[in-house]
Image (tube, grey):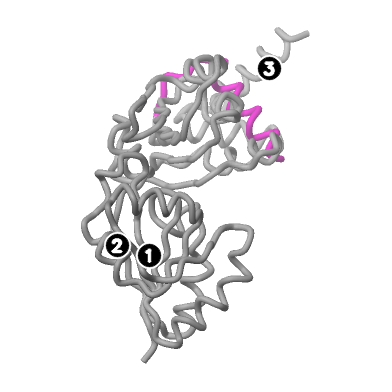
Amino acid sequence: MTGTLVLAGTPIGDVADAPPRLATELLAAEVIAAEDTRRLRRLTQAMGVHTTGRVVSYFEGNESARTPELVEALLGGARVLLVTDAGMPSVSDPGYRLVAAAVEHDIKVTAVPGPSAVLTALAVSGLPVDRFCFEGFLPRKAGERLGRLRDVADERRTLVYFEAPHRLDDTLAAMAEVLGEERRAAVCRELTKTYEEVKRGPLKELAEWAAEGVRGEITIVVEGAPEPGPQDLDPAELVRRVRVREEAGERRKEAISAVAAEAGLPKREVFDAVVAAKNAAK
């Protein structure tokens, strides 16, 4: 009989959040694949668990090479436990390749549900939670980052992102530029840890706050685009939306029509705002 692959959620901060079943699976595993073996050792010590299974590293740098080895162990009947540094494996962490390979070989895959930075940030953000979209990390390069944001400019579901602290101010500034300065958002820092902080406000204000420097693990939650219909938008916002579409490759006429449609306004009103802004810039 083939073995079982167990994906185990680990605490995102407070070790006390570890589910009881995690200890059971750590003890039962014959192979433990860990994103960081040192962090695994600290976790098991904090939990008072003494593992007996073989521990191997499984991180982004060796994920492709180590997957066949783990599949071989599973085919041989082993119970393999996969843990990452925090949260659920496969969600912006190593794991997808192994799960896909296990499924391809008809190997059972199960999970130990655990803490999630995505759901925790969403729950405490104060933004709509009925429908959301997890976007992971944005590209590091400015142009690619703007392009990815333009792709979701009209997304009406709440958006959730991960970000590194040293890129937070640039990311929030790019979000304000593309999604709108007044779009509501929440920056969730060090969730469940000693210095947990949730900063809420318009994207422009959050970008200014982040420019002073922010530390820790970051999750960003951004309000979705407003529902279509008549909107009370000032001319500057109409011009900004047209500009965003033009920068994405749309012709001005098409951009004006699209902005008018999403704002529930006559095309002439948007056209006049664009012309007025152009004349004012001369």
Q: Which amino acid type corresponds to the residue marked 1 in the rendered image?
A: Leu
Residue 142 in the figure: left or right of residue 23:
right
Residue closer to the observer: 281 or 81? 81
Q: Which SS class for mark 2?
A: strand
Q: CA distance from mark 3 to mark 1?
A: 56 Å
Residue 275 against residue 263 in the figure, above or below:
above
- Percent of width and height locating residue 248: 68, 39
Q: Which amino acid type corresponds to the residue marked 2 in the rendered image?
A: Val
Residue 196 in the figure: left or right of residue 101:
left
| Tag in front: 3 or 1 | 1
- Percent of width and height locating residue 224: 41, 36
In the drawing, what numbered circle is on residue 189?
none
Residue 279 against residue 258 in the figure, above or below:
above
Q: Residues within 10 Å of mark 2 (few under 14, many from 20)?
A: some
Query: Mark 2–mark 1 contact, CB under 8 Å?
Result: yes
In the drawing, what numbered circle is on residue 112?
2
Q: Which residue is mark 3?
A: 275
In the drawing, what numbered circle is on residue 7?
1
Q: Which amino acid type corresponds to the residue marked 3 in the rendered image?
A: Val
For the stretch drawn in magenta, what is the main secondary structure? helix
Q: Which SS class for mark 3?
A: helix
Query: Mark 3–mark 1 contact, CB under 8 Å?
Result: no
Range of magenta residues: 230-250
Residue closer to the observer: 165 or 144? 165
Q: CA distance from mark 3 to mark 2?
A: 58 Å
Q: Which SS class for mark 1?
A: strand
